[in-house]
Amino acid sequence: MIVGALSMLAAIGLAFLRVPLGFALLAVSIAGIGVAVNWTVAFQLLPFTISDAVLNYDLAVVPMFILMGNIIAKTGIAQDLFRAAYAFVGHIRGGLALSTMMSCAGFSAVCGSSYATAATMAKVSYPSMKRYGYSQALASGTIAAGGTLGILIPPSIIMVVYGILTQTNIGDLFVAGVIPGLLGLALYLVVIRLVAARNPAEAPQGDVTPWPDRWRSLAGVWPFLLLFGLIIGGLYAKLFTPTEAAGMGAGLALLIAAATGRMSWRVLRQVIVDTAYTSVSLYTVLFGALMLSKLLTLSGLAAGVLGLVDATGLEGLPLILVILAVFLVLGCVMDSMAIILIFVPLFAPVVVAQGFDLVWFGIIVIVVTEIALITPPVGMNVFVLKAVLPEVPVARIFRGLVPFVGVDLVRLGLLVVFPAITLWLGSTVS
Amino acid sequence: QNLTMSSWVPPTHFLHTDFFVPFAEQVAEVTEGRVTVTILPAPLGSPAQHWELARTGVADITWGNFTYEPERFVALWFAEFPNAGTDAEAQSVALWRTYEAHLADLEVFDGVEMLAAGLFGGGQLHHGSAQMVTPGDIAGQKFRMGGPIQERLLTELGAVPVAAPATRAYEMLESGVIDGSLHTMESVVNFRLEEALTHHTVFPEGLYDAAFFVVMNSARWDSIAPADQAAIEAIVGETLSAAWGRQFDAQNPAATAALAAAGHTITEASPELIAAVDTIYDAMVADWIVAAREAGVADPETVLAFYVETYGALTAE
Amino acid sequence: MHATAWALRRAVETVMAVFLMAMVALTFADVIGRRLFAAPIYGAHDITEHLMALVVFCGLPLVTAAGAHLTIDLLDRLVAQRWMGWWRALTAVLVVGLLALLAWLFVRHGLNAGRISEVSQALRVPREPLYLFMAASFALSTLAAAAIALTGPMTDPEDTHEEDPL
Ligand code: NA
Ligand code: NA
């Protein structure tokens, strides 16, 4: 158990000192199993774990969802979404930020990553907000916060990883993410309106789009409706499994891009190769995380944490609140994927032992990691944005995010207190 | 001395609560606490990897299905053929005795100490919307199955086999990937498939079966003191195999009753269907005799005859 | 030498892209076949799993050569300082050592798979060649990791890739 605990600390330490995350996790798990059990077991387990993970059908959703998001992002289809949102709400106060937020949510419905959502939307919408004189804080804060919806509104790569690590049905997680995601969008829109009302200079109005042009702009929305309807509709109605939904989504996105004349061979090759690179680096990290969870099993740390929780006498909701507090603190300094990979295997057994639903817990944890993406000092979405918008100071982005983090906490509280927000949609299926 | 055991069913499964946990307790009891078994909170590999996990010493004790590795344990394929029986205790004891008498020396079983062998009392045919009584009903229907024996059975009956683990059956039935699935009556209930599988076709001698092992790493076994080995030997082997079978003998009839009470259609296979299965069975046995001989079994006919006779004698008692 | 490395990288990228597209096409065809023609593709899952393994292990040496493994770069500035050179060297040794260990373990794993007749579940494709391919990929990645530790990552001058992972 002590070996297990030390190993986790070592893994985090190494990762922070720029050892690639997957290799940090692998090195620490091998050493930990070597010391806690013996080296033969460590070396035997390694190929078993890696070959089992790479030949896992459920994990094959990952590259296909990444591919779908990449196709939409790199062929300019995302641009159309923003234009449509702008046509309808651009002229009201805070309208550009509202349109940005709405297109972030729309893009999230076809993209499983928060980074990709933030990066794509920064390119699509920041120039307009800048042109109309939006404050840097509001403009960048809106994009960074809107980007976090990428992992909550399905599809979501983090949900896939959570599902694999906890053996929770990925389709159920996706369906459960829909309403919390829409709730997040609604609260963000309210925040933008409040900020714009309090400080009108930060959020000037855009131009009014005549109605005929508004209707015409809607033509840009159908790919998103089609893809989201196909994936979530298909999963909700149990028409296909998550992997099949991903394959259908990626295939359809390709057809849409080709049919609208936006796909050249060059772009196609680049999109696919990018997807493969991203998938490979994700798989490497997963190999490490799966080895780490075996270390937790073998070293007795998993059992130890269960015992510890028993000893404290914490039960039910207070226990969940303590776990969430731990995750929120971790979220300040850790990447959201790293939190899921390292800490979910440790806490999931505790949650199950307490009789909580792992789908509900998964959505809650994902909302926590959404917050982690936009809180200082390590807010990955902020860094992604900084890379796309070098002229905006990081501190200003964080300042713009304060009200968004505020409503995120409200949303988290609602989801914890009312599990039905998360579980209702899934319960209507059969 | 503490032995680790890797198991791949959830802790709520009856095999965990009613078989492995009592087994672990028994080991501690008969060795007066000198040898204990810890069942790990999570499996160390996929179900198909569990034999290797024990053989290579990653875990000390594991259990699993012989045909999760489709081409490895040729010698035991006969036990999964149709007509292996529906009395799981008699089946499991007969399989254990067959293994002991004829197969234990094969190289393929090297590196592990076999603690128990077992069957599950006959697999049956289940469908989501229609009754499968005659060969004509089955033709063209898509069934989830696992392993080469079930695949051949379905293919030759004119059905479409879809390979997937039982844990995926629910989502595959819901999404229309399959129309039906092969299970024991017990696993229809234990995998919570009652809503998706409403029509059940019962073969009195079993449509197919599944052969399981409980094994321990050889080196680990050798490291146990002789007195404790002797004490453990008294509770494994035929005794543990019989206990395995009794679990299924308790579960299967209870499941059948529960499904009947829920208004499901449960019918016996028609004589034509049984005859069709028997024809396939004969061909399977003929092919197996060739394959088993290649795999080093000196006299496959005798092995099969020994199993059939032992099972017959046990059920006649 | 440099030109050869680039030509090789482009070639492997193309192969990897073909595997990935095949995966999408297969899933698409399987769903359509099953829904519209009641004719699923036998072993579709099996093929998808193999394609995935091929994509990942074609890509591993490329990602390693490009220095594109997922890294937490919070303390980048600290690690990049001159006096931290020993740490960067240690990190490189760790990564190279791990990859070499994996290459060796997968050679053993592959040979063992041959001995125990390990095959895939549905189509019964032997696993030995796949595991040996994975071993080769780890071996190439070992070389790539060692090379970029000395020369710096192999980044594309006209690279438009953004690493927007996860
Ligand atoms: Na998403
Ligand atoms: Na943070």
Image (tube, helix red, strand yellow):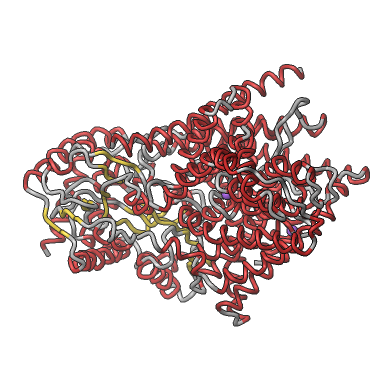
Quadrant that contains the N terminus of chain A: bottom right
Q: Is residue B83 something that shows in the picture?
A: yes
Quadrant location, ligand no. 2: bottom right
Nearest the viewer among A74 and B43 is A74
In this view, B65 is above or below C123: below
Q: Is residue B192 left or right of residue A88?
A: left
Quadrant that contains the C terminus of chain A: bottom left
Q: Is residue C42 left or right of residue A393?
A: left
Residue B266 percent location from the top left of the image: 15, 59
Q: Residue at x 19, y 47 (%)?
A: B82
Query: In the displayed image of the protein, which residue is found farthest to the right?
Result: C83
Residue A291 percent location from the top left of the image: 60, 52
Kindly indicate the quadrant of the structure image that contains residue A296: bottom right
Nearest the viewer among B59 and C152 is C152
Q: Residue at x 73, y 57 (%)?
A: A374
Q: Is residue C72 left or right of residue B305?
A: right
Q: Residue at x 64, y 61 (%)?
A: A343
